[in-house]
């Protein structure tokens, strides 16, 4: 899968409170922002682990990095 770093499309998703809290906990466990964690899960579901670009496995966008920029 060719990696296109420019992400221009937005997807809005509505979660109930428990799903949102669980998303935050799961993202924190993998040291990812919630949106990046959800994107990773979506890509894994669409392409499988073997079809994903190796750089997606190594993206380490910490929630704290957004504040450092």
Image (cartoon, grey):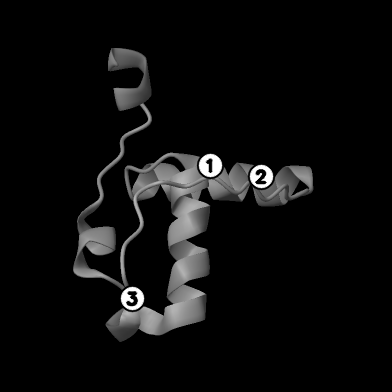
Question: Which residue corresponds to the image point at 56% horizontal and 49% vertical from the top-left?
Answer: 23
Quarter of the picture holding the C terminus = top left
- Classed neighbour count for the residue bearing mark 3: other residues with Cα under 10 Å, few (<14), some (14–19), many (≥20): few
Alpha carbons under labels 3 and 2: distance apart:
29 Å
Q: Which residue is mark 1?
A: 24
Callout 2 touching callout 1 (CB < 8 Å): yes
Image quadrant in which you'd find residue 65:
top left
Locate residue 17 relative to residue 34 in the image: left or right. Answer: right
- Classed neighbour count for the residue bearing mark 1: other residues with Cα under 10 Å, few (<14), some (14–19), many (≥20): some
- Secondary structure, mark 3, is loop
Locate residue 7 relative to residue 11 in the image: left or right. Answer: left
Question: Which residue corresponds to the image point at 59% horizontal and 49% vertical from the top-left?
Answer: 22
- Classed neighbour count for the residue bearing mark 2: other residues with Cα under 10 Å, few (<14), some (14–19), many (≥20): few
**Figure check: 63 above or below 6:** above
* Residue 49 location (% of width, % of height): 33, 80
* Front-most of residues 52 and 62: 52
Q: Which residue is mark 3?
A: 1
Which of discs 3 and 1 lies nearer the camera? The answer is 3
Which of discs 3 and 2 lies nearer the camera? The answer is 3
Which label is found at residue 20? 2
């Amino acid at each position: 899968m060719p990696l296109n770093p420019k992400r221009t499309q937005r997807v809005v998703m509505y979660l109930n409170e428990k799903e949102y809290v669980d998303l935050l906990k799961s993202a924190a466990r993998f040291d990812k922002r919630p949106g990046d964690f959800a994107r990773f899960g979506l890509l894994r579901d669409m392409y499988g682990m073997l079809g994903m670009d190796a750089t997606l496995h190594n993206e380490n966008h910490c929630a704290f990095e957004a504040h450092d920029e």
